[in-house]
């Protein structure tokens, strides 16, 4: 299936980006978050560059009716800014600041970081599972 | 701590953007990693394999860089085990509750000018910076 092959390619390119930019390196990420200490602004360039390419690319792709290998574009339709969005973002940010890994790098670093990354990944999957089992208590989830 | 590396950061960022555009143009999907990952367990059967392959690509990439450059990509993770477990739980739970992470809200959401994503990015960046600052105080850094 074409969409499987293209997803593998996209994952590979994404992972190359994470590796080349050093987003996979927790030490580098933490020194970006350390604005009151020895701040290294490099990762702002990752975000800036990724946003520039994606914004232009999405604009061009947005002129199409359908994607090449799927029936339709699947775009999140939700608009309202609610408590789950805000609380989830804060919790995620705390976890990110504790270790220096967000989900993409946590996956890519599985091939680099040994047992500690596997432990982080397992805990992250556990956190996702906890959400799944308790989500009926969180109004407005998606 | 680390050296300032704006060139490799910008090249890496452009590759991340390229991947996001590829996934949208080819498959019509947002490149949101927390959503793609959790979908391996949760999505319908016809929708699992591409997600698993995207994740596989993420895992292979550092090895490819390693093979081509002949050097292991720099990886330094100093967090203690209790922090690793706590951090992982928070990242997993938070990204699901908040419907996205650095990729889905940060790269894809901001590129679509989503207000939800802007709020998310400001909050997780702020929370991450505050957490690092507090840790530095507690650990006496």
Image (cartoon, rainbow, N blue to C red):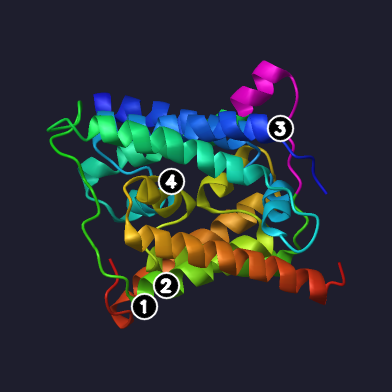
Rendered image: mark on residue A86: 2
User: To which residue does mark 4 refer?
Assistant: B107
Q: CA distance from mark 1 to mark 3?
A: 38 Å
User: To which residue does mark 3 refer?
Assistant: B73
**What secondary structure is marked by label 2?**
helix
**Residue drawn at the location 50% of the way across and 31% of the way down:** B14
Chain of the residue where label 4 is placed in the rendered structure: B
User: To which residue does mark 1 refer?
Assistant: A83
Residue A109 on image: x %, y % = 62, 42
Mark earlier in primary sequence (3, 4): 3
Image position of B115 (left or right of A106): left
Chain of the residue where label 2 is placed in the rendered structure: A
Q: CA distance from mark 4 to mark 1?
A: 22 Å
Pointers 2 and 3 in contact (C-beta within 8 Å): no
How many labels, in total? 4
**Residue drawn at the location 73% of the way across and 69% of the way down:** B133
Taking depth in this image into account, of A118 and A2 the one nearest to the observer is A2
Pointers 1 and 3 in contact (C-beta within 8 Å): no
Chain of the residue where label 3 is placed in the rendered structure: B
Image position of A138 (left or right of A107): left
Q: Is residue B97 magenta?
A: no
Answer yes or no: are tags 2 and 4 on the same subunit: no
- Position of B17 relative to B82 (above/below): above
**What secondary structure is marked by label 4?**
helix
Magenta highlight range: B63-76
Answer yes or no: are tags 3 and 4 on the same subunit: yes
Closer to the camera: disc 2 or disc 3?
A: 2
**What secondary structure is marked by label 1?**
helix
Pointers 1 and 2 in contact (C-beta within 8 Å): yes
């Amino acid at each position: 299936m074409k969409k499987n092959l293209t997803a593998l390619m996209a994952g590979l390119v994404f992972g190359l980006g994470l590796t080349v930019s050093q987003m996979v390196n927790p030490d580098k990420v933490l020194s970006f978050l350390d604005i009151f200490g020895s701040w290294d602004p490099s990762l702002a360039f990752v975000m800036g560059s990724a946003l520039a390419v994606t914004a232009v690319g999405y604009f061009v792709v947005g002129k199409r009716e359908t994607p090449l290998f799927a029936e339709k574009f699947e775009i999140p339709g939700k608009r309202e800014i609610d408590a789950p969005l805000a609380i989830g973002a804060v919790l995620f940010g705390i976890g990110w600041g504790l270790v220096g890994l967000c989900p993409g790098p946590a996956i890519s670093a599985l091939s680099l970081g040994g047992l500690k990354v596997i432990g982080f990944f397992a805990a992250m999957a556990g956190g996702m599972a906890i959400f799944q089992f308790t989500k009926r208590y969180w109004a407005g989830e998606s | 701590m680390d050296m300032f590396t704006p060139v490799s950061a910008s090249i890496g960022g452009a590759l991340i953007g390229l991947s996001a555009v590829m996934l949208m143009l080819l498959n019509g999907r947002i490149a949101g990693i927390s959503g793609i990952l959790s979908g391996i367990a949760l999505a319908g059967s016809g929708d699992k394999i591409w997600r698993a392959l995207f994740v596989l690509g993420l895992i292979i990439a550092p090895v490819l860089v390693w093979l081509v450059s002949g050097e292991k990509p720099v990886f330094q993770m100093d967090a203690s085990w209790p922090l690793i477990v706590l951090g992982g739980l928070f990242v997993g739970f938070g990204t699901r509750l908040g419907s996205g992470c650095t990729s889905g809200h940060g790269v894809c959401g901001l590129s679509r000018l989503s207000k939800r994503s802007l709020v998310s990015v400001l909050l997780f960046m702020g929370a991450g910076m505050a957490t690092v600052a507090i840790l530095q105080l507690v650990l006496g850094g």
